[in-house]
Amino acid sequence: MDGDRVAIGGDLHWVRVLKGFEKGCYLNYAEGEDIQWYSPEQRAVIFPHLQKKFDDWEAPAGWSFQWDQHFQTVMMGCARPHEEKPWLHADVQSVYLQLHQHGYAHALSVLHNGELVGGLMGVAVGRVFYGMSMYHEESNASKYALEYLIQFLKVKKWKVLDVQKLTPFLSKMGAVEIQRDRFLDLLKEQMKFRTVLGDWSADRSWLQKDPYPLSAAWPKGFNQQDPCPFLV
């Protein structure tokens, strides 16, 4: 381990990346670099069930939200160049698209007067949602996206929204830092619940919860015996 970075190498098979999330680790490396996996020593999380200020939250007039209707568009919006490390490059986008196609990655679209103006994307395992990135084309679109997400998870009785690293904005939204070990304990606890797979815009996704993610057979061609060290 090297501080927040816990492993280097491996490959980008979607099952390996999914196992990374189940172990609290995520991809974070620039195009052309070695594949790198991170699990911050100080983890920023939001506890939706404790956020009382969102009990009666309502979107302002003209604003609406949709799950999983514009995944690639939202992902491309999140991938726009910015000052931070450009981790959401083409190779990683391909993995997230596969995770979406298999029902684990989701995108929340923010619409203003019917026009897509922002959104966020993330991955769900058990009852943990990893909020990985968000973007906006209009002021407050990202803020409204996160507020909607927190209320949505609170209503569903989810207790952990991971946001990786604390920022002043996330702090205002209720994020706090906890130790890595504490986060992993919470993750293990919430992995006892079944993952809600598929299109989250469909009510059936929530009426029928799918089995534990890796209870099914491993995909053909995936070498189960050769994981990254932290995935053993």
Image (cartoon, rainbow, N blue to C red):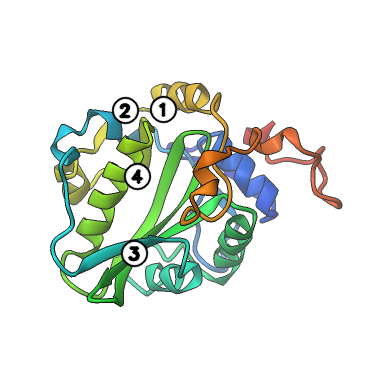
Contact, mark 1 vs mark 2 (Cβ under 8 Å): yes
Measuring 39% from the left and 62% from the top, which residue is drawn there? 85
In the displayed structure, does residue 183 sit left or right of residue 219?
left
Contact, mark 1 vs mark 3 (Cβ under 8 Å): no
Amino acid type of disc 4? Val
Amino acid type of disc 3? Gly
Amino acid type of disc 1? Phe
Amino acid type of disc 2? Ile
Q: Residue furthest right?
A: 221
Q: Which mark is residue 163?
A: 4
Q: Which mark is residue 74?
A: none
The residue identified by callout 1 is 183
Query: Is tag 4's residue or tag 1's residue first in the polypeptide sequence?
Result: 4
- Tell me the SS state at disc 4: strand
The percent coordinates of residue 209 (x first, y second) are 58, 37
The vertical placement of 198 against 180, above or below, is below
| Mark 1 closeness class: few <14, some 14–19, many ≥20 residues within 10 Å | many
In the displayed structure, does residue 220 sit left or right of residue 30?
right
Which of the two residues, 117 or 226, is positioned nearer the viewer here?
Answer: 117
